[in-house]
Amino acid sequence: EVQLVQSGAEVKKPGESLKISCKGSGYTFTSYWIAWVRQMPGKGLDWMGIIYPGDSDTTYSPSFQGQVSISADNSIGTAYLQLSSLKASDTAIYYCARRVAGHAFDMWGQGTVVTVSA
Amino acid sequence: DIVLTQSPASLSLSPGERATLSCRASQSISTSLAWYQQKSGQPPRLLIYDASTRATGIPARFSGSGSGTDFTLTISSLEPEDFSVYYCQQGSKWPLTFGGGTKVEIK
């Protein structure tokens, strides 16, 4: 069974950093792009960036460039999203998703809830 | 960035009725458009990709059409489980972008 399993919920203080993981299984991890998508409370979906684990090629949305870092460890089939200098406005659910044909995303992680509060 | 505008923002219909959701792109994206369904507390689920191809396991009552800048998701006869939020997403140019969503509510 193809799955993306994300790390658990996090509560952080403003200014702290965070690294969320997304472990792929049931498929060849290095053959599919993995994207990260943010969903703020009660809002829509924001595409943050994407990585191809096969060669670590990475593209970021200009809205998130410099604010986040996406990486992958092929030895354990896991992609990461690093958020630094957290603000209250980073409070959101963060999803990873596997890209298939036409830049659509056919498999999503369960989401990681991040709460940033003093 | 390519802006996707979904309309209406919300739609109130009864089970068995037909739902027609629109997604308009700010520039041509050919057929590089996907549709997702998102229920409360769950991640999005891919319904349609390449504007009109149903994803694996998606019922035939869901259909997509359009090309260029205007796209439509049609649900031919609403089932109780179809009442949720729907998003479109373009894959034509970086950065990939999503529409703001259409909420399909029970009338």
Image: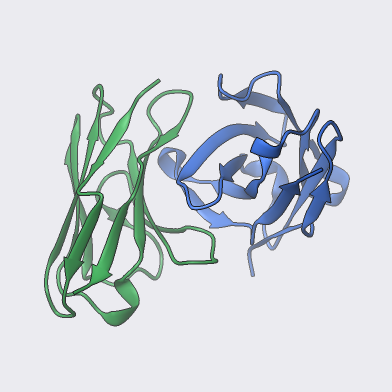
Q: Where is residue A106 shown, x and y percent of the image?
A: 50, 54
**Residue ID at (14%, 69%):** B76
**Which of the image's four quarters has the C terminus of chain B?**
bottom left
Is B70 drawn above or below residue A20 in the view shown? above
Q: Quadrant of the N terminus of chain B?
A: top left
Residue at image position (58%, 48%) is A98
Locate residue B17: give its quadrant: bottom left
Place of residue A110 in the rendered image (x, y in percent of width and height, measured from the top left): 64, 62
The percent coordinates of residue B36 (x first, y second) are 39, 55
Vertical comparison of A55 with B12: above or below: above
Q: Position of residue A2 (x, y in %)?
A: 63, 64
The answer to whether residue B66 is left or right of residue A30 is: left
Kindly identify the residue that appears in the image at 58 percent across and 56 percent down: A108
At a point 64% along the width and 57% down the height, the residue shown is A109
Residue B69 picture quarter:
top left
The tint of chain A in the picture is blue
Position of B81 relative to A79 (above/below): below
Q: For this view, does A89 lie left or right of residue A15?
A: left
Viewer-side residue, B52 vs B19 = B19
Q: How is the image coloured?
A: by chain
Q: Residue furthest left?
A: B17
The colour chain B appears in is: green
Is A22 or B104 nearer to us in this picture?
Answer: B104
Q: Is residue B46 left or right of residue A94?
A: left
